Amino acid sequence: MYNNHGAQRYRETDISSISKEKIIVMLYEKMQSDLMCAQKAIKEGNRIEMTKKINHSQRIVSELRGALDHTIGGEVAQNLESLYDYLFHQHLEVLVNQDESHVVNCLRVLEPLLQAWKQIPSGTGDNTAREQAESQLTTETGSENATQKMKPQDPAPEVPEGTTSLLSVSA
């Protein structure tokens, strides 16, 4: 058997380098794909495939809802949470009723979200979070104190010979 460790590490590195905005777009695209496959499965009477695709799509909705940051997102996060709640309940309706109209409802909500997220520049969320943290730090301590807090005040303490410091362990 081949060792997949290298390929797995590559995928992990590749995923960790993707912006949060791109990850959300990818999740929306996968959800859209799952819903279209579920819609096809409903038409074909394939309940097992329909259930598999709806369950996966529903897990994506749950993850997206759980990842919302209301402190940064404010009203936008609140509106997204309402949309995710609606999508989640529509998924339940599909599972219970096997009714294609609920899939169509999900796709109608998802399409404008997907298009909007595709237009957001990479790094926007990180920049907003950083700006908000800096603003909060400045507000709490005053701008002069905030600048001083970000600079080291004291040199690193001497480490007695024969002992290991945390700095040497982490380096």
Image (tube, rainbow, N blue to C red):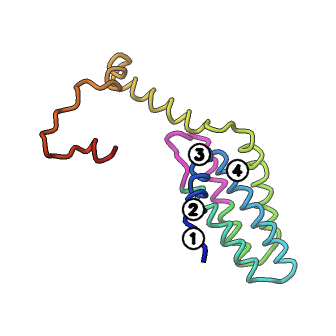
**Magenta stretch contains residue 171:** no
| Span of residues in magenta | 67-86
The picture places residue 60, in percent across and down from the top left corner, at: 63, 62
- Sequence-wise, which precedes: disc 4 or disc 2? 2
Please tell me whether mark 3 or mark 4 is closer to you in this view: 4
Question: Which is the main secondary structure of the residues drawn in magenta?
Answer: helix
Magenta-colored stretch includes residue 73: yes
Secondary-structure class at tag 1: loop
Query: In the rendered structure, which disc, 3 or 1, sits on the residue that comes first in sequence?
Result: 1
Q: Classify mark 3: helix, strand or loop.
A: helix
Q: Within 10 angstroms of label 2, few (less than 14), some, or many (20 or more) residues?
A: few
Viewer-side residue, 145 vs 45 = 145
The residue at 52%/39% (across/down) is 72
Of the residues shown, which amino acid type is indicated by label 1?
Answer: Asn
Residue under label 2, please give it.
6
Residue plotted at (77% across, 78% down): 98
Quarter residue 19 falls in: top right
Q: Are marks 2 and 1 in contact (CB under 8 Å)?
A: yes
Asked if residue 116 lies left or right of residue 6, the reply is right
Residue at mark 3 to residue at mark 1: CA–CA distance: 42 Å
Distance Cα–Cα, label 2 vs label 3 = 37 Å
* x then y, percent, for residue 47: 76, 83
Q: Which of marks 3 and 4 is nearer the N terminus?
A: 4
The numbered disc on residue 3 is: 1
Residue for badge 4 = 25
Residues packed near mark 3 inside 10 Å, few (<14), some (14 to 19) or many (20 plus)? some
The type of residue carrying mark 2 is: Gly
Mark identifier at residue 77 = 3
